[in-house]
Image (cartoon, rainbow, N blue to C red):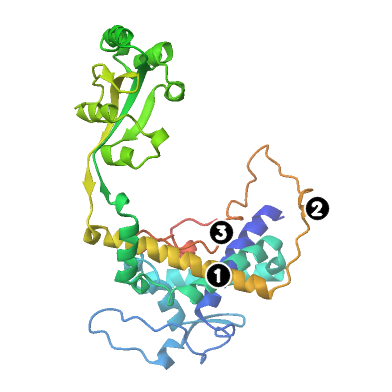
Amino acid sequence: MVKPTHVALVGVGIAIGIAIGCQEKPKDSQAAPGSPVPAVPRAAGPGSPSQGAEELRAPLAKIDDVTITIGELQERINRQSPYIRARYTSLEQKKEFLESLVRFEVLAKEATKRGLDRDPEVVRTMKQVMIQKLMRDEFDAKITADTVTDEEMHKYYDANVTDYVKPEEVRASAIVVKNKAQADRVLLEAKGDAGRTNKGFRDLVTKYSADEESKLRGGDLRYFSTTGNAQLAAKERLPDAVVKAGLQLANTGDVSGVIDAGNGNFYILKQTGKRRAMTKSFDDAKAQIRNKLFRDKRLKAQTDFVQGLRDQSKIEINEANLAKVRIDTSSATAGDESHGKDPIAPPPAPGLPSPIPLPAPGSADLPNQGNP
């Protein structure tokens, strides 16, 4: 007896394969020899003679009413990576690949016979694959990186120039006290064993600092620079003398002397980090900006497309019943990890790795790769 979970998993895998197959050819293209081959054949190598349509339609195998043609097998193999394709150059290896397609069709027919094409999990997977296909057809050719203009990129660069041109920044922790005499005494501890480590300095902050806001963060003033500090609201700015002294600390771990902030407070700083100045010109940032604007454009187009479809649909949501939905948080639910992932998320920007495509029939079950 076949376990239900095994049947469902086989059904999902077959549904994905069938859906991918539907992306490549008309529904009845595998009914018999003589139907058109969906893909343009790829040449076997330099100097190889071109293949005629009649040759590509020639049958290789028949499984009841399903025909696998030369064109279909050739197209399926040529969709693989060069490394995989190199394994299927001999007649025996081509036969192995053909056997994997036959096995796929046999399993698909059995799954359909058992009604798995109507299984909710299979139907949901089919819908996800169809959505992916819909979004590719709708946007891949219309919105590309080339649709981002130089004018748009220059405008973005100018509006966000602080992301590309940054001054030197320092991060420091501070002990803040109210009089010079106390500051001198605390400085001896800060420069001694008590303040040698970051934890030790934080302990001194807790013990002595009068600035409650930074004290809650262990004295951390976060990263600051002359330019950045000047751009802050008045109440958030550090005293200029503190910024100047902090930027003069050469190395992480260095402790300043007593700094008169000019507002009745005296600071002792310990440098905890440093960022070098960065200047990235428009030309240096151009590829990065193009990628971002491409993704933003595509995401907006997808959002508008989906909103348009929603506007054309009659949608009713019963929030009262939504509150009755119970979520099992005791442990992760096995077997449905992909459900809930956004099937129309924007693709990686050009130059970044793309998600691994769903396998074509046969490619997920190549010979010598292990069978389920």
The answer to whether 48 appears left or right of 64 in the picture is left
Q: What secondary structure is found at the residue carrying circle 1?
A: helix
Front: mark 3 or 1:
1
Residue 351 appears in the picture as rendered? no
Q: Position of residue 152 (x, y in %)?
A: 34, 68
Label 2, on which residue?
A: 320
Q: In the rendered structure, which amino acid carries the disc numbered 1?
A: Asp
| Quadrant assignment, res 354 | bottom left
Residue 145, labelled with which disc? none
Above-or-below relation of 8 to 234: below
The answer to whether 349 appears left or right of 23 in the picture is left
Depth order, front residue of 84/352: 352
Q: Position of residue 368 (x, y in %)?
A: 43, 58
Q: Residue at x 35, y 89 (%)?
A: 51
Measured in 3D between alpha carbons, the distance from the residue under mark 2 to the one under mark 3, in whole angstroms, is 25 Å
The answer to whether 96 appears left or right of 13 in the picture is left
Above-or-below relation of 267 to 341: above
Q: How many marks?
A: 3
Q: In the rendered structure, which amino acid carries the disc numbered 3?
A: Asp
First in sequence: mark 2 or mark 3? 2
Measured in 3D between alpha carbons, the distance from the residue under mark 3 to the one under mark 1, in whole angstroms, is 16 Å
Label 1, on which residue?
A: 304
* Image quarter of the C terminus: bottom right
Q: Position of residue 18 (x, y in %)?
A: 57, 72
Label 3, on which residue?
A: 342
Q: Residues within 10 Å of mark 3 (few under 14, many from 20)?
A: few
Q: What secondary structure is found at the residue carrying circle 2?
A: helix
First in sequence: mark 3 or mark 1? 1
